[in-house]
Image (cartoon, rainbow, N blue to C red):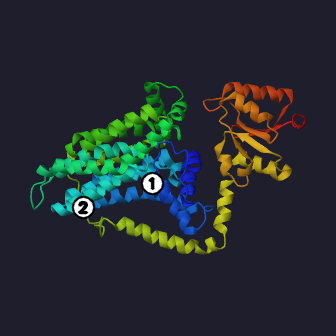
């Protein structure tokens, strides 16, 4: 929830207000720009329901793509991939399905470009194959401009597109001679469309107008070595799923992918290096592995089906009317949802629901205790904290005073500031809370210059004693 509120949604709100968001680190802005359109259409940034609802579209659309491939190819491999992806997403990312993170959108775009390459391979006409390949490279660019994990997919995409073009001869001529021309065109498109953002951010890092996420990533990794990070990821996957899923299903999926030449490409060019990068750089959260699963399960399922021989469905699985059936279904669902929610929007009920949910951003108990205190006593000053969600909780923005709690001298100055009356700090020191500051606060609590009001959800809400205020 943290990044969804503090980063992705904050950036979307900024775009909706015709502003340019700050502190974006290296994160591309394609997703926030599109989310901002929901705010523009409804005319307010206070109702975030539609922006959050968009998050659920991507995992559902991913399953629809695999379902369409299963019916088109009459192959059980894609059906196995559909089931495996759905179960794995639910077990490892259940909480993410309704949050505004970029991980599932990137995963969808990676799968969508595979889907489009499959449609290109079906076609025997050069013009149709060019259209499908062009759409696929556009989606690959979208992945690179949604989150950094999509950049690796985009970098390997020209080779996959060229090899895909080479495999099947077209009715109006062989595709092999044009394969590397296809690779060059795809590489040029990706370079022109995606590179400017990353070059722009690098310039900002060098001139000091923005900072990289590297320090925070290393802090989140907690100083673990590569081997320790690999064990950490393995343990978290086993905890989220099971030993059988991690130690049997994933190796079988990889084996199925590398057993067939056509599916070996995405496995070697993307799945394996991406998994290594995630372990090395972002092992602290399983959501960073999201783009890996559609590639691994699709390549693995289809690979096993081709390796063992074609598995045919019966007539109980009719052919869908076309590749855009998923889009049509989404549009129909959106229209129906809009009709059903229309009156609620007019009556302001969504605004009220939004406020109720935002009051719980800080955690059920912490938020309840904090608002109960404010209702009883009011706030007599600002709140010093590194808890950034506080800024987005209703009626708290004006009282919010941010400090990273890593520099003792600035915290000392803030405590002495008469406009600051409260502290909201973690109970324990850690990578994002300097130990000497925690020790100083404990000392002040013992001396009585600070007074503990309540402790909840790993945080303490503290008030400066009346005598300490001039």
SS state under label 1: helix
Q: Residue at x 45, y 50 (%)?
A: 104
Residue in front for this viewpoint, 339 or 135: 135
Q: Would you call the spot at circle 2 few (<14 residues within 10 Å), some (14-19), or many (20 or more)? A: few
Q: Residue at x 47, y 59 (%)?
A: 34
Q: Which residue is mark 2?
A: 131
- Could you say where residue 289 lies in the image, as x and y percent from the top left? 43, 41
Q: Residue furthest left?
A: 173
Residue in front for this viewpoint, 154 or 368: 154
- C-alpha span from label 1 to label 2: 23 Å
Q: Which residue is mark 1?
A: 30
Q: Would you call the spot at circle 1 few (<14 residues within 10 Å), some (14-19), or many (20 or more)? A: some
Q: Is residue 409 left or right of residue 326?
A: right
- Could you say where residue 295 lies in the image, as x and y percent from the top left? 34, 46
- Could you say where residue 122 lies in the image, as x and y percent from the top left? 20, 59
Q: Residue furthest front?
A: 207
Cβ–Cβ under 8 Å for marks 1 and 2:
no
- Could you say where residue 8 lies in the image, as x and y percent from the top left? 53, 50
Q: Residue at x 46, y 29 (%)?
A: 229
Q: Can residue 424 be seen from the camera position used here?
A: yes
Q: Quadrant of the C terminus?
A: top right
Q: Is residue 404 left or right of residue 449?
A: left
Residue in front for this viewpoint, 90 or 148: 148
């Amino acid at each position: 929830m943290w990044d969804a509120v503090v980063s992705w949604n904050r950036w979307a709100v900024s775009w909706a207000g015709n502003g340019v968001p700050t502190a974006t680190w290296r994160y591309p802005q394609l997703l926030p720009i599109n989310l901002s359109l929901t705010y523009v259409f409804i005319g307010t940034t206070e109702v975030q329901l539609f922006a959050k609802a968009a998050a659920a579209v991507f995992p559902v659309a991913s399953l629809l793509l695999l379902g369409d491939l299963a019916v088109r190819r009459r192959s059980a491999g894609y059906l196995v991939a559909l089931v495996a992806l759905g179960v794995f997403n639910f077990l490892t990312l259940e909480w993410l399905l309704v949050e505004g993170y970029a991980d599932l959108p990137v995963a969808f775009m990676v799968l969508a470009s595979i889907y489009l390459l499959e449609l290109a391979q079906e076609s025997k006409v050069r013009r149709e194959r060019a259209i499908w390949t062009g759409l696929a490279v556009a989606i690959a660019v979208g992945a690179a401009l949604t989150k950094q994990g999509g950049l690796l997919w985009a970098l390997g995409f020209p080779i996959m597109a060229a090899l895909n073009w080479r495999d099947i001869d077209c009715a109006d001529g062989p595709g092999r001679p044009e394969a590397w021309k296809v690779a060059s065109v795809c590489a040029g498109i990706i370079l022109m469309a995606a590179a400017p953002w990353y070059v722009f951010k690098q310039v900002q890092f060098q001139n000091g107008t923005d900072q990289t996420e590297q320090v925070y990533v290393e802090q989140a990794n907690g100083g673990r070595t590569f081997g320790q990070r690999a064990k950490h990821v393995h343990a978290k996957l086993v905890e989220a799923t099971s030993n059988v899923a991690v130690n049997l299903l994933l190796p079988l999926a990889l084996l199925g992918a590398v057993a067939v030449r056509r599916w070996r490409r995405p496995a070697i060019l993307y799945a394996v290096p991406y998994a290594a990068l995630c372990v090395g750089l972002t092992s602290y959260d399983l959501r960073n592995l999201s783009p890996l699963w559609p590639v691994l399960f699709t390549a693995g399922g289809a690979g096993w089906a081709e390796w063992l021989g074609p598995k045919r469905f019966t007539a109980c699985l009719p052919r869908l009317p076309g590749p855009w059936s998923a889009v049509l279904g989404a549009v129909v669902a959106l229209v129906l949802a809009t009709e059903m929610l229309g009156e609620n929007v007019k009556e302001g009920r969504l605004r009220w629901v939004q406020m109720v949910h935002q009051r719980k951003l800080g955690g059920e108990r912490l938020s309840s205790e904090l608002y109960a205190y404010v209702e009883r006593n009011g706030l007599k000053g600002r709140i010093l904290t590194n808890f950034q969600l506080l800024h987005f909780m209703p009626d708290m923005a004006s009282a919010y005073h941010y400090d990273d709690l890593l520099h003792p001298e600035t915290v000392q100055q803030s405590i002495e500031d008469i406009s600051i009356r409260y502290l909201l700090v973690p109970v324990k020191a850690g990578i994002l809370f300097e130990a000497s500051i925690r020790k100083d606060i404990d000392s002040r609590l013992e001396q009585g210059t600070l007074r503990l009001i309540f402790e909840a959800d790993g945080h303490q809400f503290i008030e400066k004693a009346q005598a300490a205020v001039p």
